[in-house]
């Protein structure tokens, strides 16, 4: 993959990781409300972002978290 296809986030310590975790949790809770195109774009960006730890099972974990925390289920 070319460098221009990568997304880089600069982080500067534990507070940044906490903020990213809080934002990630908010995204998980809002996930069912997002349009499918937005979901795909977020997954695509997350899969190429550098500057944070990466997990090869990201999409599986995302699916599990969304299912476990889906507040819109009837």
Image: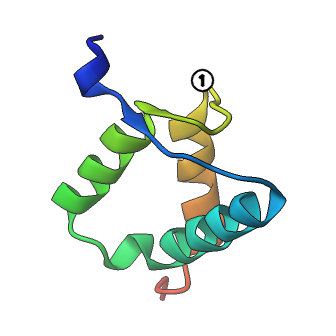
Q: In this view, does 71 lie to the left or right of 45?
A: right
Residue 27: horizontal and vertical position, in percent?
A: 49, 71
Would you identify the image quadrant in which residue 28 lies? bottom right
Q: Residue furthest front?
A: 12
> Callout 1: helix, strand or loop?
loop
Q: For this rendering, which residue is in front, 24 or 14? A: 14
Q: Which of 73 and 57 is in front in this view?
A: 57
Horizontal side, residue 21 vs residue 58: left or right: right
Where does residue 43 sit, x and y in percent of width and height? 37, 45
User: In this rendering, is residue 7 above or below 24?
Assistant: above
Q: Tell me what residue is drawn at x 63 percent, y 59 percent.
A: 65
In the rendered image, the residue lying farthest to the right is 14
Q: Which residue: 58% across, 65% down?
A: 24
Give the left or right position of residue 9, taking residue 22 as reference: left
Q: Which residue is at the front of the view, 1 or 64?
A: 1
Figure colour scheme: rainbow
Which residue position is annotated with label 1? 56
Q: How crowded is mark 1: few (under 14 residues within 10 Å), some or many (20 or more)?
A: few
Is residue 67 among what the camera can see?
A: no
Can you give x and y, in whole percent of width and height, for residue 51 in the image?
A: 58, 36
Residue 45 location (% of width, % of height): 34, 42
User: The N terminus appears in which quarter of the rendering?
Assistant: top left
Is residue 2 visible in this depiction of the protein? Answer: yes
Residue at image x 50%, y 45%? 9
């Amino acid at each position: 993959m070319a460098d221009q296809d990568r997304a880089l986030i600069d982080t500067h310590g534990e507070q940044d990781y906490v903020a990213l975790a809080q934002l990630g949790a908010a995204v998980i809770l809002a996930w069912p409300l997002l349009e499918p195109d937005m979901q795909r774009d977020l997954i695509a960006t997350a899969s190429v972002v550098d500057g944070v730890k990466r997990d090869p099972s990201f999409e599986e974990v995302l699916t599990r978290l969304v299912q476990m925390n889906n507040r819109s289920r009837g």
